[in-house]
Amino acid sequence: MNVQLRVEAMEQISDKKRAIFKSTMELVRENGFHGTPMSLVAKHAGVAAGTIYHYFESKEHLLCELFNYAQQQAIAVVEQETVATIPFKESFFKLWMGLYTFYRDNQDMLRFFEQFVNSPFRTTMPPLEEDKFYTLLFAFFERGIREGELKDVSPKIVGTLAHSSILSMAKMAASGRLRFNKKELQQIQQLLWDGIALGR
Amino acid sequence: MNVQLRVEAMEQISDKKRAIFKSTMELVRENGFHGTPMSLVAKHAGVAAGTIYHYFESKEHLLCELFNYAQQQAIAVVEQETVATIPFKESFFKLWMGLYTFYRDNQDMLRFFEQFVNSPFRTTMPPLEEDKFYTLLFAFFERGIREGELKDVSPKIVGTLAHSSILSMAKMAASGRLRFNKKELQQIQQLLWDGIALGR
DNA sequence: GCAAACCGAATGAACGTTCAATTGAGGGTG
DNA sequence: CACCCTCAATTGAACGTTCATTCGGTTTGC
């Protein structure tokens, strides 16, 4: 039943579709949003140009679906690290580290995300999965406030602050300007925690 | 002499050039990076297409120069709020608020920044002014560490965290999803300060 | 009268998308 | 098993549009 549910949620993606997603993400990372013509995507994915249009209505749809697809993977990380049976503080550190390593190890995706959320697509075709991601994230921080672990600031604010700290650190690591060791990463998380936690 | 210096630094920009910058920023904000043809920029700026090429070598150069131009204004904010004669803690809050209001009130610019730094231009033509911005920012936080006001974490880390918090809050305010009142803004700054400051 | 600034139609390349044609997997029939 | 039919998957050349850029000519300021 667990498997059943996962299959339903993921909607069983075809190999070609996945190859197209992968190529698009890599090319967008290197050449940007513009600068990745469909012909190039096709070549990289090892399919003909026409084939892409069998799976996707247009370039715009391809990009939007890719965003949702990638976002689902980020959602999976949040769901995995925020089970309600684990104490809040422990979950907080696990979530921070989980998302950080996810973004750090998926730099194509990270770059694609940033390009996408600042593009006009976001407004012309609002992505469903992004809402879900933030809903989950904010719910987690609301729990922290409810349980008296966090200061009484809007969960949206705390959640956004936490997430932006993760993103900026992952981008820093990705750009190669600074590589963090385990101790530094713990320092960063602790620093954030000190800010948002309710001192006893 | 004060005036003299400022003029030298700004290099005396022509009205047409400024109009082109303004139009580009507005159009990029609405239509994204792609989706703003030079012809549209020209029309919005009230000049002919060819005129743009009198001032800028190419679209790419226009965008890069615009980035530097905009970045200079952000630099001006940092310089204004981080004079060494004001106590560090007070400067910190002034800087946070100064940059926050700057970004919030210049949403075109904010959006353009985000698009630009995640585009491939950043790597093909590394922007000088971005370096200067971060150099100033990091120097300020280094001062905080040196004066024993901040925890001994790399100034690059603290600076990046602080800046990302500003950006994410300004983006939130810009998107209209949440409008902050003065008390909430103070809460956010305090929260950050609590995280990075050395408890006595 | 001479630069520099400015114009905007023309050019040519690049790109998203289409479509007629081909392949191949499955399945029903005798 | 051979045959045919169907339909989805796939191909890639061709099309039409859009867009950055050019350039010969005109205006403006000095």
Image (cartoon, coloured by chain):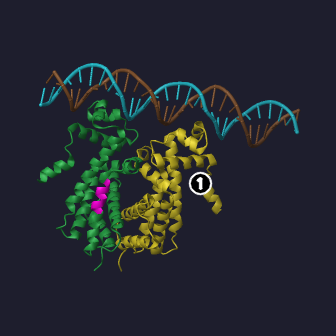
Chain colours: A yellow, B green, C brown, D cyan
Inspect the image, locate mark 1, and give the three-letter code of the amino acid beneath it. Met
A123 left or right of B163 in image = right
Which quadrant: the C terminus of chain A?
bottom left
Q: Position of residue A146 (x, y in %)?
A: 41, 71
Seen from the viewer's position, the closer of residues A124 and B57 is B57
Q: Position of residue B112 (x, y in %)?
A: 34, 47
On the question of residue B173 being in view, the answer is no
- The magenta stretch spans residue A16: no
B5 left or right of A53 in image = left
Magenta stretch: helix, strand or loop mostly: helix
- In this rendering, the answer to whether B8 lies above or below B186 is above
Quarter holding residue C24 = top right
Q: Which residue range is magenta in the image?
A: B130-137
Secondary element at tag 1: helix
Seen from the viewer's position, the closer of residues B53 and B26 is B53
Quarter holding residue B137 = bottom left
- The magenta stretch spans residue B135: yes
Label count reads 1
Which quadrant: the N terminus of chain A?
bottom right
- In this rendering, the answer to whether C2 lies above or below B64 is above
Q: Label 1: chain? A: A
B99 left or right of A120 in image = left
**Residue ID at (42%, 67%):** A141
Mark 1 sits on what residue?
A: A10
Q: Position of residue D9 (x, y in %)?
A: 65, 41
B165 left or right of A108 in image = left
Number of other residues with Cα within 10 Å of mark 1, as a class: few under 14, some 14 to 19, many 20 or more: few
Q: Position of residue C22 (x, y in %)?
A: 70, 31
On the question of residue A33 being in view, the answer is yes
